Structure formats: structure tokens, C-alpha cells
Image (tube, helix red, strand yellow):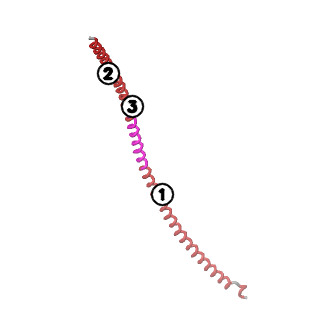
Amino acid sequence: RRELQCQQAALQQAQQDFEQQKEIQAQELSQKRRELQLLAQEVAQLSTRRLKEDEEMLWELKRSREEIGFLSEELQRVKAEQQGRVLQEIEDLESQVVAQRKLARLYEDSAKELHEELQHVLVQLEVSSPERRG
């Protein structure tokens, strides 16, 4: 009988130990679940924030590309405009050079004519001058 009581007491003690161990494990499991839930929330928040940052970066990249495209078009327009202006200036200068050459030829021709007329007048003066005759 004593042995039976000892066995029952040992069995009861083992049952209590088992229940205690089970309770401890349940608490630990519960704690682990809470920690995992917190980690999951943190990961979700980080993922959401990262996704938002990525979207902002993509939007910024798209805006930058559009701006680069616009600036590139503007640069091409300005270059074409400047090229057109330069070509026009060159044409204008060439026209001025041609006009100046024509004007120079006219002055040369006029100067020759004046020189010839002056020579003619001088010859006539020499011929008609009474001092020369005598």
C-alpha cells in the first residue's frame, strides 16, 4: 500500500511537473507568437515604407527623364535657332562683302574717270595757257 501511495505521489508529482512544463511551454509559445506578430507588423511597415519610397523614386526618375527630354528638345531647338541665325549672319556678311566690293569698284571706276577728266582738263589748260605759248 505504501508503495502504491509512493507511486501515486510520484505519479501526481510527475503529472504536476508535466502540467507546469506544459504551462511554461504554452507561455513561451504565446510570447514567441507575440514576438512574431510584432516582427510581422514591423516587416509590413518596413515593406510599406520601402514600397512608398520606391514609388517616389520611380516618380522622381520619370520626372527627371521627362525633364531631360524637354531640355534635350529645347537644346536642339536653340542649337537649330542659333545655327539658322549664324547662317543668316554669314549670308548677310557675304552680301555686305559683295556690296562693298561693288562699291569699291564703283569708287575705283569713278576715281579713274575723275583722273582721266582731270588729266584732260590739265592738258587743255596747258594747251590754252598763254604763258606756255610764249
Q: Which residues are magenta?
A: 48-68
| Label annotation for residue 42 | 3
| Label annotation for residue 82 | 1
Residue type at numbered disc 2? Lys
Numbered disc 2: secondary structure: helix
Front-lying residue, 23 or 12: 12
Seen at 63% across and 81% down, the residue is: 119
| Count of numbered labels shown in the rendering | 3
Q: Please state the horizontal and vertical placement of residue 31, each as a whole percent of the image.
A: 36, 25
Q: CA distance from mark 3 to mark 2?
A: 30 Å
Would residue 49 be counted in the magenta stretch?
yes
Task: Please say if the residues under marks 1 and 2 sit with CB atoms less than 8 Å apart.
Answer: no
Q: Which residue is mark 2?
A: 22
- Earlier residue among tags 1 and 2: 2
Front-lying residue, 71 or 42: 42
Foreground mark, 3 or 2, reads: 2
Numbered disc 3: secondary structure: helix
Task: Please say if the residues under marks 1 and 3 sit with CB atoms less than 8 Å apart.
Answer: no
Front-lying residue, 32 or 5: 5
